Amino acid sequence: MRRLLLPGSIALAICFLFSLPVSAGKINTSDFPLRVLILFRNGARHYHGNGGGMSSLEQVDGLGEADLFENGQPTGFDFNYTCSQPITPTPGLETFMARWKKPERVLQIVMPVMGGKPGDMNSCDLNVNLKQGTAYVRHNGGVVEEPAAEFKEWMIKHQYDPEHGKDLPATATSEQPATGQQGAAPEGAQQP
C-alpha cells in the first residue's frame, strides 16, 4: 500500500508544480522593446472550484482596443485574450511592455502579478487585428479611430515616446489627440 501512495504523491506534486503559472517571475525588460496602450478592455473571470473560499481564479478572457508603439509609430489594433489574471488598467497614457510572439498576429504583454512581490510579472498573449494607418484615441468618454499620422504629430509635439520611457506628454495635462481636433483632449485619460 505504501508503495502505491509514495509514487502517487510524487506524481501529484509534479503535476501541481507544472500547473503553476510559468510566466510569473522576473523578466528581462530588454526582451520587450514594444509598448502597448490599452484604451478599452473587458473580460470575464472564470473560477475553478465550488465557490466560497475554495474557488480560485483560473483564467480571464475578453477583448479590447489598443495602440501599439513600434519603431516610433503608433498603430491601432483590436484584440482578444485569455490570461491567468485580469489585464490591470494603467493610469493615463502609461503602457505595457510588449513583444511579438507571432509577428502581426500575437503580442505578448507583461504586467505586475496581482498580489505578488514587487518586480514579479505575468505575461498575457493578445491575439491582434492591426489597423494599419489608424490609431485609437479617447474622445468624449469613448474610444475612436484617427489617422496614425495625426497621432504621430501629437506625439512629436508633446514629446510622448513610450518606447523610450516617456509615458507622460511634455504638457501639464494628459491630453491626447482627438479626431478632427489636433492636440485637443478627450475627456479624461482614465482606463475603463
Image (tube, grey):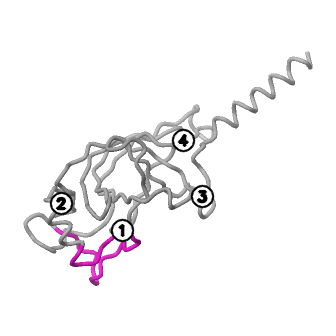
Q: Residue 148 carries which label?
A: 2
**How many C-alpha atoms fall within 10 Å of the one at disc 3: few (<14), some, or many (≥20)?**
some
Q: Residue 162 carries which label?
A: 1
- Between disc 2 and disc 4, whose residue precedes? 4
Label 2–label 1 contact, CB within 8 A: no
105 up-or-down from 136: above or below: above
What secondary structure is marked by label 2?
A: helix
Q: Residue 120 carries which label?
A: 3
Mark 3 residue type: Asp
**How many C-alpha atoms fall within 10 Å of the one at disc 2: few (<14), some, or many (≥20)?**
many
Residue indicated by mark 4: 57
Residue at the image position 51 percent from the left and 43 percent from the top: 84
**How many C-alpha atoms fall within 10 Å of the one at disc 1: few (<14), some, or many (≥20)?**
many
**How many C-alpha atoms fall within 10 Å of the one at disc 4: few (<14), some, or many (≥20)?**
few
Foreground: 104 or 187? 104
Foreground: 44 or 136? 136
Magenta stretch bounds: 156-177
- Between disc 2 and disc 1, whose residue precedes? 2
